[in-house]
Amino acid sequence: MSLSQIARSLKASPTLKLNEKAAILREKGDPVIHLGGGEPKSRAPIDAIMAAVNNMNTGEVRYTPADGILSLKKAVIRYTEEFYNRRVAPENVIVSGGAKQSILCALMAILNPQEEVIYPAPYWVSYPEMAKMIGAIGVAALPEDGTFYPRLQDIEQRVGSYTKAVIINSPNNPSGAMYSEEFISDIVGYCEKKDLYLIMDDIYHRLIFDGRKPINVFNYTKDLSEKSKIIVVNGISKMYAMTGFRIGWAVGNKKIIEAMTNIQGHQTSGPSVVLQLAAVGALNGIQSGVENLRVTLENNRNVMIDQLRSFEGVKVTKPDGTFYCLADFSVYDKSSNKLSEYLIDKVQVLTVPGAEFGMEGYLRLSYCGTIKDITEGIERMKWALDPNSPNELYIGDRKLVRDWV
């Protein structure tokens, strides 16, 4: 069977693949621990659920405008004013089937084949694949100082005549690093000087720790006109624990939003009215759930970091936010894919290989599950990897004896 060049070049999303694998193992009754996921355990807000149910009860579930219903646009406008101190019009907003679709539509609207988009490494797994989908080229910028915190020169060195855009994801998936105000200020000024688009992937911007405050990209721009090339992307999946609702949005100049709307209209039409109304409920309803989730994640992070730091040979940087940490396990195996498969095979702990994020030898571990999952999962990992661990391990009633080196 003949497939297109683009189809042949794309890989399956490793994170979605792991979610599927975890579900299959659990269905079989296996005691799997999923430390690779990006889904909070908390429930969706009751205001969101009631808004969706009320619409379903009417039986009037119809098409919506390609760029989203007005009530949700108004909620996004209010959100943008509250957290970005920026008042925008409905024409500056597009609602999509998740923040992922907003980013893809933005890239489709601004990139021609062979043009480049730059993003710091480690990077979210979908950035390079999205670039491939439109015949463009994704360029990873790994910080030269060996940290997870890029500097302007790390980006500058990779900008060439084909560069059209930069994507910044802070706090970052997979590292949990929150980039400094100085870096955000520098990258905004640089992109304006070079006439580059700047896509801010802010999906985790309120899930930050240790007293940090969300960084507002608009504080550093000189151009707040309709010529601005800043596109801010966000959504309900992470901070409201509504991953399955698949609603995200982008805020940008009217021309880029119009282009994204035309693209989305031919992709999927408008997002589901039921799910959009749920998003309205979440954004306009009681907000205590966001802070409760943030506090839970901060506590879980502390537990995971303490566990990992007692693990001989593992190097870990304390995350500033998100659900994730990216730990260096290269002392045990330079291949993160082999190591991840080994942990699934030996102790049924799922992790995401760092190679998928541009960081070979690392594993992404999620702390958005329970404390029990975190402690037991890392205990199993230590038993499988650390030769100083006891020779025996119990998983439930099952006794495992290390029979390998």
Image: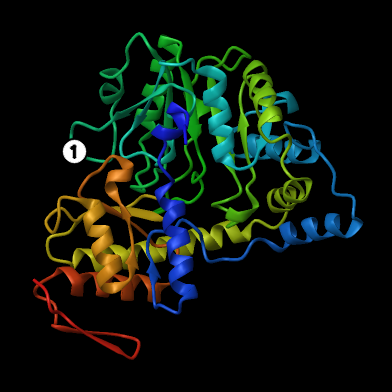
Q: Is residue 343 above or below residue 190?
A: below
Residue 263 percent coordinates (x, y): 65, 25
Q: Does the rendering let one see residue 157?
A: yes
- Residue drawn where x is 60% and y is 61% of the image: 289
Name the residue nearer the viewer: 378 or 222.
Answer: 378
Q: Does the rendering let one see residue 130?
A: no
- Residue drawn where x is 79% and y is 33% of the image: 65
- Quadrant in which the C terminus appears: bottom left
- Left-right relation of 11 to 154: right
Task: Work out which residue is located at the far front of the displayed protein and give it.
Answer: 1
Residue 117 percent coordinates (x, y): 41, 23
Instruction: Please give the residue where the numbered disc 1 appears in the rendered image.
Output: 146
Q: Is residue 355 above or below residue 270?
A: below
- Callout 1 crowding tier (Cα within 10 Å): few <14, some 14–19, many ≥20: few
- Left-right relation of 37 to 339: right
Residue 233 percent coordinates (x, y): 56, 35
Q: Quadrant of residue 129?
A: top left
- Residue drawn where x is 65% and y is 56% of the image: 287
Task: Work out which residue is located at the far bottom of the displayed protein and give it.
Answer: 397
- Left-right relation of 46 to 159: right
Name the residue nearer the viewer: 297 or 64.
Answer: 64
Given the image, on which type of amino acid does mark 1 rest?
Gly
- Residue drawn where x is 37% and y is 63% of the image: 35
Name the residue nearer the viewer: 399 or 241.
Answer: 399
Q: Quadrant of residue 53?
A: bottom right
Q: Secondary structure at mark 1?
A: loop
